[in-house]
Amino acid sequence: MSSLAHILSGVVAAAFEAEGLSTAFGVVRVSDRPDLAQFQCNGALAAAKSAGKNPREVAQAIVVRLKENQDFSRIEIAGPGFINLDITDETLSRYLSETAGDGRWGVPTIISGETIVLDYGGPNIAKPMHVGHLRASIIGDSLRRICLFAGYRTLGDVHLGDWGLPMGQILAELETRYPEWPYFDDAYRGPYPAESPVTMDDLEEIYPAASQACKLDEGRMERARLATRDLQNGRAGYRALWEHFINVSVAGMQANFRALGVHFDLWKGEASVHELIAPMIEDLREKGLARESDGALVVEVGEESDKKEFPPLILTKRDGAVMYGTTDLATIVERVRDYNPFRIIYVVDQRQFLHFEQVFRAARLGGIVSNPETLVHAGFGTMNGPDGKPFKTRVGGVMKLEDLITGGIDKALARLNEAELAADMDEKERQEVARKVAVAALKFADLQNNRLSDYIFDLDRMTSFEGKTGPYLLYQAVRIQSLLRKADLPEGGNSALRDPQKAGISLSSADRPLALLLAEFPDHFDAALRNYTPHILCDYAFRLAQEFSSFYGNCHILSEKNNDVRAGRLALCELTLGRLLLVLDLLGIEIPARM
Ligand code: ARG
């Protein structure tokens, strides 16, 4: 199964083929003028040249063939040779019945069993998560869900930032403050304390102090560099202390991700691939790709077609410490070895474009990936504050993710009160509904933008129950749910859906637009999957909710006297809800049972 337009394309393509023309001309699209036709095919214009006829003549020949098909209720040639098509209600309702029931709503399953690794989140040890990590997590988790639904095996990896200079900066700062700690005593042999000497709150104070000290004092910076190198080389005390940083940081991250409903399959980080780095560098040397430059080891990744000079990827610095690009390259070695992925998708700030281009080029040069299409950087734009500059707290600091979520929940509670929703709930249930409304607001506000665009964070707007927002969609879904509950349908849903032969879905001009929109779903899913663009699904969900609203306003549903018509309309409610719930799930948005 696929979308209705796709199925009709098959029919029209056969007509072109029968005329001795390429099937590629048969593409049928949903009409961009729904007032004139439901579907259109513009292939006759393109085919005219190879057919040696004028476009209207080609269209005429196609139309004659299409008239034999019972699926169409109206076939017309418009303008220079556009073919406008309407389908019968039977065809439409048969399609809808056939795509109900298996939970895929017409989306075909990819059964290749191929694996997609998604790298998103990317929070850094010892630093609070901020809004940049919010975008990475939300978009990445949605893409994971989309790939999974398509039929791929997916692995979401958080890829912690745990191996760079910040680690050495914190170690140097702690060594300055607490030289007596056993972690800094090279003669110490005993086991290190099991309890972390620092909490996450401590680290949030220590890291900025450490980084500031390095900026002001070159001597301190040098010590931080050495500490980084020694950590990477396995100095026991540093490693033990560093593991404490990881544990306390990860606990905090997990709480944030849990609140957001963002899932990871793998909790690896830059450090996970440490053992792979030396052999990788050796291999790159043998292949003649790694060379010394000013004491550093680099891979030249410039290409002929570059307009300006392309900076080399630095593998190791003069002091031997490895870089961000080195761990990313080694992580590709690891992922290829362990998962043989069809794709590795990096959901990371677009400002890291150059970094990924360097890493990807090095991976291709070094033969680490054989297919250049394996590596994809799905970048995203910046989340800005009302002033159009990167989002900050009121006093100008970095906005912590945790505070953002809490602020969202407070706002959602206020919105629920305003709309007199959730009024009869106990405190616990209302809190849970508020959390779901807040998460829906945050996620939808982020995902509805084209990934690469910047957008302005506006808590007031995104939590509104009106307009193109997450809460609006939740509200619509909950409303359909409760309507269906009241309809008291038989177990397993509507009979009009279960037995299309007998019942079918009866349609009228008031509900046909909704039915047609339902039939579009697979195409939107496909576009979102192929371009890594969840915003396409956001658009679809919003259009669906709006179309449902007009249907709901214009048609009797529960109060409809004619039983066939009533069953048909209830079926449309079920079909709308099914797709809406699926799309929300693909966006990572949970809906409350009631509101
Ligand atoms: N930790 C990085 C940051 O905060 C993001 C990591 C992205 N993933 C990657 N494989 N480089 O900017």
Image (cartoon, rainbow, N blue to C red):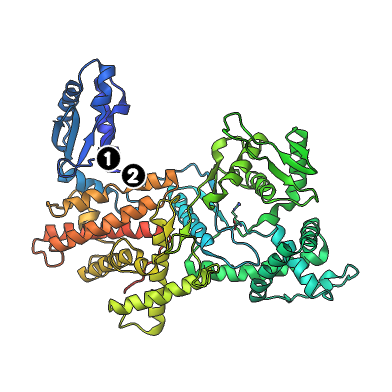
Q: Which residue is mark 2?
A: 523
Q: Which residue is mark 1?
A: 5
Q: Is residue 404 visible?
A: yes
* Direction from residue 428 to residue 356 in the image, left or right: right
Name the residue: 78% across, 39% down. Answer: 292
- For ligand 1, which image quadrant applies? bottom right
Q: Are marks 1 and 2 in contact (CB under 8 Å)?
A: yes
Between 534 and 322, which is closer to the camera in this rendering?
Answer: 322
Q: Amino acid at mark 2?
A: Asp
Q: Amino acid at mark 1?
A: Ala
Between 508 and 501, which is closer to the camera in this rendering?
Answer: 508
* Direction from residue 347 to residue 238 in the image, left or right: right
* Circle 2: element type: helix
Circle number at residue 555? none
**Which image quadrant: the C terminus?**
bottom left
- Residue 113: x percent and y percent? 51, 44
Name the residue: 34% across, 71% down. Answer: 593
